Amino acid sequence: MNAYVERVIEYVKKKHGDEPEFVQTVEEVFSSISPVIDAHPEYEKADLLTRMVEPERMFTFRVVWRDDEGQWHTNIGYRCQFNGALGPYKGGLRFQPNVYPGIIKFLGFEQTFKNSLTGLPIGGGKGGSDFDPAGKSDAEIMRFCQSFMTALYRYIGPDVDVPAGDIGVGGREIGYLFGQYRRLKGAWENGVLTGKGATYGGSLIRPEATGYGAVYYLCEVLNHEKDTIEGKTIACAGFGNVTWGICKKATELGAKVVTLSGPDGYIYDPDGVATKEKIDYLVEMRASGRNKVKDYADKFGVQFFPGEKPWGVKVDVVMPSAMQNDVHLEHAKQIAANGIKYYIEVANMPTTNDALAFLLEQKGMIVAPSKAVNAGGVGVSALEMSQNSERLVWTAEEVDAQLHKMMKTIHEMSVEAAEEYGLGYNLVAGANIAGFKKVATAMMEQGCF
């Protein structure tokens, strides 16, 4: 590894040691870019990497809201505007009890390179709160969102920072946030948020976009291997928007998702989540607020494995699609023992670094990184921004075609970047290098802002 890269990684470990997710993603990205740093000594001279690992700005704010019983509560809100070298900051808001500065920084750093891969003019950002929407009434969620936006609105805008949804923030929450923004600004700036409803500037297929894009990326990998998606079995995690989108597109293309997971365990459906009734039920499960995947097993009479993860199931493709650090070394060993060839990350950093290193060492296994695979979601968010600026509404077919083209390009960029530095068909290194080079060039051209 390049000595300068090593020094910056050590700097991050020392300064941000209490934020392990952030340290992990910096180490994962920077461990791939040594060949680029070797070829560009001016980056070390400008100390570019140290600038890259520190957010341009980060806000912390108090969010006070009242529940239905009249009791007041206080949560903490965050917005990290990590890197704006390529355009307005862009990235989701996450409402989840485990949100703290390290999670927000890790997501913002990862988002910077993911957004770079889309080829669209958007920078990287992320935000959220330790608020838990589970079990809250619509009125309570509305009051929280209104308080959150009252603190955030002065720092965002269509040409400044454009938040979107993430875990715990769906169409309902985006609607409440946008309503409060409009109330405060007294202006119709619908480009300030993405993931909006179709009645007020949202893009068609945005809820499905991350899952659709992941399947399109998988198809590019299969094409490279002279293989096809038809007939493939897929292990997924979670049952939110991303997994729902994967189920829909995989079914359309002749494959089937056979596992779902939740905090309570996982289900195995050998027939696949591959009928309209089953796929629609995922939406019902999310809306229930119960957050239990066992509900699917009870309804459709399939096996439920309490307290377990689905990574020991023998399938053709593994697509971890729920949350960070969901696949540990012991799971990676199960995956390898099952002879699985295609490991396609979908969630943000779903694999621990030691598990990822192990999988990359497996002969014949193809590993694709989440920053490339899940970029379709933010890509369609950027397309929503374009529609808003032009006062247009594209058809679902138009958006889907743009998404398909984008995922094909991201795969090609990753392949070309890896081959340029003699790394073969290494999609992890290729995505890191391709995303990094564009951001690095922009920062240097702007005087390392």
Image: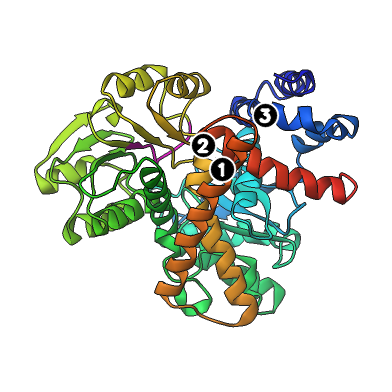
**What colour scheme does the image use?**
rainbow
| Mark 2 and mark 3: Cα distance apart in space | 15 Å
Circle 1 residues within 10 Å: few <14, some 14–19, many ≥20 = many
Residue drawn at x 70%, y 26% is 34
What kind of element bears circle 1?
helix
What kind of element bears circle 2?
helix
Residue in front for this viewpoint, 59 or 30:
30
Sooner in the amino-acid sequence: mark 3 or mark 1: 3
For the stretch drawn in magenta, what is the main secondary structure?
A: loop
Three-letter amino acid code of the residue under disc 3: Phe
Between disc 3 and disc 1, the foreground one is 1
Query: Residue at label 2?
Result: 427
Q: Which residues are magenta?
A: 318-324
Sooner in the amino-acid sequence: mark 1 or mark 2: 1
Circle 2 residues within 10 Å: few <14, some 14–19, many ≥20 = many
Q: Is residue 221 visible?
A: yes
Q: Is residue 58 visible?
A: no
Indicate which disc residue 30 carries: 3
What kind of element bears circle 3?
helix
Would residue 166 be counted in the magenta stretch? no
The reply to whether discs 3 and 1 touch (Cβ–Cβ < 8 Å) is no
